Image: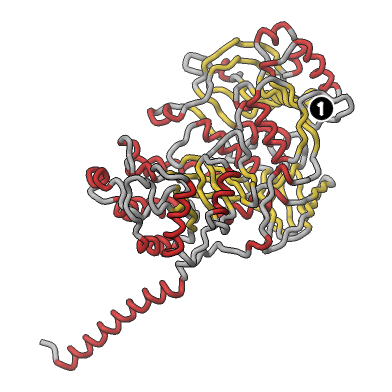
């Protein structure tokens, strides 16, 4: 039995502990300012201008010869990012930095033009190859490509191997061996089998199917290669990669191989975005109780958010969410405003950011949705500035106008679904446009190559996972445990190849895209030292990729660098002049 004095002392101590915990929680809420967007900034100096409105000096002129609209579209995008002019007809007095050829549509009377380009030491890129019949009947064309022998007119490969030093992200073997990997295999594995001349450097080759001996394996079918004869350089792609934006990174890697030192600006941003998340209305709860024994609010809070937080923590990323007061405006009830404050606290603890979603279901117009949502935000998030909007596949210019007319003038960035016919980053009516590059729960081999391409040419990716499918599952594949398994597995595994790029939220990504597009810079190389001149400062840095081939950086002033791969570096310029001293290093290079 305790004494009255001890009882009083224990009671006082317990009361003190209780109030300390209570006060610390209240202090945390009060001092952390959950209701404020920590990525808000002074937007008076922010001016989003489209590529078409910019007037940068060109780096040179590329010529495209061919009939493939897809390859021409890819070339246009690449020239936009690399500040080249694109010609589609041969000019009499034009000096070309590079010629891209759609070999599949090559006519016999054009072979002489290509041979003339070769004699003038103009680099050629065959984005697709001429037919085997044309190569057999025109030995000068085969010699131009470095083809010594046509081993087989067609072979079905088991897979392909991409080697180090070409695309950012390192070596990858694209061979489907397991049941899960077979779902990811979407490459065209049927190609002609060529034996190349000596002096050929292979960046990607095929994996022979079972039944071929070691002698055959020593001459694996080349998929992407470079053939040098004297001072002439020809690149060749024995697949369909150049007919899509996979070719953007490949063209960048090819051009870099033409120079001992190759420097170009990048965006340097990686983003993890939850689309249509969270919603605040009671939606489809009868179905969700059947599947999860929870209503929609509990599913999003107790199941989905811990998964988002876990993936973010694993990748050291800062989640961006696209709020949807409600998704289905036909059946959902009124949104719960109190839940918004709860998610604002969770986001602040993860250093995440909230924007708005313009995706919805129901028989209302976009203008009606914006008006209804606006009332919700004014009442429950009046101090939180929403700076970006997920616009799905809406027309950018019409959507920008609708946002301004509805009073969403704070929106500086529009996040859109992937569209290969548009630039990955651009601007319209003062708003930055960013495309989603990856679906968080999908990862095929072509998607992997596309990601490597974007990382190589732009240093940019946006993984977007749409969580409306969790609220309205159409099959077992849409249920959370299935979606999270794919989402976490793909994101945690494949994103690690690019961990040298910065993790950001959408607003910071928009600012970096704006910086990248409008950046003025100059590069000088004297053979031992690179000088990069920009307007970079510590508060407003600029980012560059430097590819040095068989050389390495010895020291640097005016910024910092991160090694990506042998001879490849990410540069952060924090001064108006960046000086990079580099040196030769011993490196084995495999040639054929």
Q: Which residue is at 52% across, 34% downward?
A: 447
Q: Give the number of callouts.
A: 1
Quadrant occupied by the N terminus: bottom left
In this view, 231 is above or below 22 = above
Is 138 located above or below residue 252 in the figure?
above
* Location of residue 230 in the rendering, given as x and y in whole percent from the top left corner: 82, 25
- Helix, strand or loop status at disc 1: loop
Is disc 1 surrounded by few (<14), some (14 to 19) or many (20+) residues within 10 Å? many
Q: Is residue 11 above or below residue 529?
A: below
Left or right of 242 on screen, residue 98: right
Q: Which residue is mark 1?
A: 122
Q: Is residue 5 left or right of residue 29?
A: left
The scheme the figure's colours follow is: secondary structure
Image x and y of residue 7, in percent: 17, 88
Q: Is residue 533 among what the camera can see? A: yes
Who's the residue at 52% across and 39% down the image?
393
Residue farthest along the top direction in this orientation: 137
Residue under the image location 24 percent in, 45 percent down: 286
Say which of 280 and 270 sits in front. 280
Q: Nearer the viewer, residue 167 or 31?
A: 31
Image quadrant where one finds the C terminus: top right
Quadrant assignment, res 152: top right
Residue 23: x, y in percent?
A: 36, 79
- At horizontal 22% and vertical 89% (from top left) the residue drawn is 9
Residue furthest to the left in view is 1
Is 281 in front, or is 115? 281
Residue 428 image point, x, y percent: 64, 47
* Residue 500 is at least partly visible in this image: no
- Quarter residue 487 falls in: top left
Most extreme residue toward the right is 93
């Amino acid at each position: 039995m305790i004494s009255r004095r001890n009882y009083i002392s224990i009671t006082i101590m317990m009361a003190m502990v209780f109030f300390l915990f209570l006060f610390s929680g209240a202090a945390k809420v009060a001092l952390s300012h959950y209701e404020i967007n920590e990525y808000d900034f002074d937007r008076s100096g922010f001016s989003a201008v489209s590529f078409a409105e910019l007037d940068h000096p060109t780096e040179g002129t590329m010529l495209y010869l061919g009939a493939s609209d897809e390859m021409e579209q890819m070339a246009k995008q690449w020239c936009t990012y690399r500040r080249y002019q694109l010609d589609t007809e041969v000019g009499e007095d034009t000096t070309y930095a590079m010629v891209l050829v759609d070999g599949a549509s090559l006519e016999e009377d054009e072979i002489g033009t290509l041979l003339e380009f070769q004699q003038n030491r103009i680099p050629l890129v065959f984005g697709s190859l001429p037919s085997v019949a044309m190569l057999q009947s025109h030995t000068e064309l085969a010699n131009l490509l470095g083809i010594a022998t046509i081993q087989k007119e067609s072979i079905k490969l088991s897979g392909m191997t991409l080697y180090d030093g070409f695309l950012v992200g390192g070596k990858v073997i694209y061979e489907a061996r397991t049941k899960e990997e077979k779902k990811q295999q979407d490459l065209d594995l049927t190609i002609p089998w060529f034996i190349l001349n000596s002096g050929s450097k292979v960046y990607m080759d095929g994996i022979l199917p079972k039944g071929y001996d070691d002698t055959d394996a020593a001459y694996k079918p080349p998929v992407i290669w470079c053939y040098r004869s004297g001072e002439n350089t020809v690149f060749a792609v024995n697949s369909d990669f150049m007919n899509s934006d996979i070719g953007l990174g490949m063209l960048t890697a090819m051009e870099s191989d033409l120079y001992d030192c190759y420097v170009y600006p990048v965006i340097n941003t990686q983003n993890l975005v939850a689309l249509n998340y969270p919603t605040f209305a009671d939606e489809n709860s009868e179905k969700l109780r059947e599947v999860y024994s929870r209503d929609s609010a509990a599913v999003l809070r107790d199941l989905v958010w811990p998964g988002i937080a876990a993936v973010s923590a694993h990748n050291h990323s800062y989640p961006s969410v696209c709020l949807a007061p409600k998704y289905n405006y036909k059946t959902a009830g009124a949104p719960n405003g109190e839940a918004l404050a709860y998610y604002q606290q969770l986001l602040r603890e993860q250093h995440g950011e909230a924007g708005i979603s313009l995706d919805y279901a129901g028989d209302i117009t976009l203008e009606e949705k914006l008006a209804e949502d606006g009332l919700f935000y004014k009442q429950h998030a009046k101090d939180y500035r929403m700076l970006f909007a997920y616009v799905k596949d809406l027309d950018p210019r019409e959507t920008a106008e609708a946002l301004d007319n509805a009073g969403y003038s704070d929106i500086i960035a529009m996040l859109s679904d992937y569209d290969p016919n548009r630039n990955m980053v651009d601007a319209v009516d003062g708003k930055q446009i960013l495309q989603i590059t990856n679906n968080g729960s999908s990862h095929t081999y072509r998607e992997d190559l596309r990601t490597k391409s974007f990382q190589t040419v732009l240093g940019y990716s946006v993984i977007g996972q749409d969580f409306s499918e969790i609220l309205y599952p159409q099959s077992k594949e849409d249920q959370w445990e299935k979606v999270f398994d794919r989402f976490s597995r793909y994101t945690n595994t494949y994103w690690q190849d690019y961990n040298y790029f910065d993790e950001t939220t959408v607003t910071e990504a928009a600012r970096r895209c704006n910086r990248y597009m409008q950046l003025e810079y100059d590069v000088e190389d004297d053979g031992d030292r690179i000088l990069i001149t920009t307007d970079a400062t510590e508060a407003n840095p600029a980012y560059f990729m430097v590819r040095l081939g068989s050389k390495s950086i010895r020291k640097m002033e005016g910024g910092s660098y991160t090694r990506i791969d042998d001879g490849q570096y990410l540069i952060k310029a924090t001064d108006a002049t960046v000086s990079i001293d580099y040196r030769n290093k011993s490196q084995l290079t495999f040639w054929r």
